[in-house]
């Protein structure tokens, strides 16, 4: 029974492979990196099983420094194949020519212009196109010299790691800035309420100060008027007392004179 089940499974697998061979491969995304024609996954595993395992492990970051045995293993390791709907598309291993470099330059400029990428500043589209162009240059260098390709791989990974660190730092700083802005906004509302309260208190105190100042001016005016009236009254009393004193002095002198005259007559 197990034998018949395994036979049925093998038959189904073979039928699936025949159907895939008769089908058109799916459309892969356009890129500057040159690839081979897509092949079914089963054929790819049959011909490049060890390379597939190494590329999968490297893509999953299971091996930090995998062992490289031949050029066939270097190129898929640096630039892993693309997978889609059971089809595999390997990176091309054709030897590059000067014409390929010129075509890459023209296509690179065309993609930058067609995608309307920014010429300066932060632009994800421009970064993606430059990344694809660098991968194609890595492919061309690796085909000529695998060792230089591995060195470029280390440089590329270091640059991407640095970029990722800067991106993480930027996102962290943006998050911190947003939190500070939210906190500041919350504190701003409390501060605005406090300012309104203080302004209302200030208005009330200003009104009270104006009222007291007006009262003070009125009191000063009353005191000044009272002082002037008292001074006038005192002046009149002094004048009256002076006249009275003068009259009394004259009367005293008259009385003394009359007494003296009486003494002389007697």
Image (cartoon, helix red, strand yellow):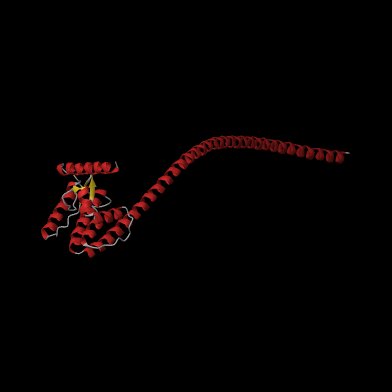
- Residue 52 in the figure: left or right of residue 166: left
Q: Which residue lies furthest to the left in this view?
A: 99
Res 155 quadrant in image = bottom left
48 or 205: nearer the eye? 48
Q: Give the x, y percent position of residue 27.
A: 18, 44
Q: Residue furthest front?
A: 1
Q: Give the x, y percent position of residue 82.
A: 23, 49
Q: Give the x, y percent position of residue 175.
A: 39, 47
Q: Can residue 88 be seen in this view?
A: no
Res 236 quadrant in image = top right
- Residue 212 in the figure: left or right of residue 8: right
Q: Is residue 166 above or below residue 184?
A: below
7 or 223: nearer the eye? 7
Q: Give the x, y percent position of residue 94.
A: 14, 58
Q: In this view, does 121 lie above or below 141?
A: above
95 or 102: nearer the eye? 95
The structure residue drawn at horizontal position 36% and vertical position 49%, both measured from the top left corner, is 171
Q: Is residue 179 visible?
A: yes
Quadrant containing the C terminus is top right
State how many labels appear: 0
Q: Residue furthest right?
A: 266
Quadrant containing the N terminus is top left
């Amino acid at each position: 029974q197990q034998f018949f089940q395994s036979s049925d499974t093998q038959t189904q697998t073979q039928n699936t492979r025949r159907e895939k061979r008769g089908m058109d491969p799916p459309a892969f995304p356009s890129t500057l990196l040159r690839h081979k024609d897509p092949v079914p996954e089963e054929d790819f595993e049959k011909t490049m099983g060890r390379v597939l395992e190494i590329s999968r492990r490297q893509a999953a970051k299971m091996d930090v420094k995998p062992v490289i045995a031949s050029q066939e293993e270097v190129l898929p390791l640096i630039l892993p194949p693309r997978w889609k709907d059971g089809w595999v598309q390997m990176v091309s291993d054709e030897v590059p020519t000067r014409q390929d470099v010129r075509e890459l330059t023209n296509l690179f400029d065309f993609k930058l212009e067609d995608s309307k990428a920014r010429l300066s500043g932060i632009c994800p589209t421009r970064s993606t196109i430059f990344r694809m162009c660098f991968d194609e240059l890595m492919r061309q260098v690796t085909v000529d010299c695998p060792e230089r390709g591995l060195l470029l791989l280390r440089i590329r990974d270091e640059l991407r790691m640095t970029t990722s660190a800067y991106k993480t730092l930027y996102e962290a700083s943006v998050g911190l800035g947003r939190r500070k802005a939210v906190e500041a906004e919350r504190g701003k509302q409390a501060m605005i309420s406090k300012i309104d309260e203080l302004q209302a208190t200030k208005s009330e105190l200003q009104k009270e100060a104006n009222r007291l100042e007006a009262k003070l001016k009125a009191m000063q005016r009353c005191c000044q008027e009272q002082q002037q009236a008292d001074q006038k009254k005192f002046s009149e009393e002094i004048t009256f007392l002076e006249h009275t004193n003068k009259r009394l002095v004259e009367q005293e002198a008259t009385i003394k004179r009359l007494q003296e005259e009486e003494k002389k007559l007697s």
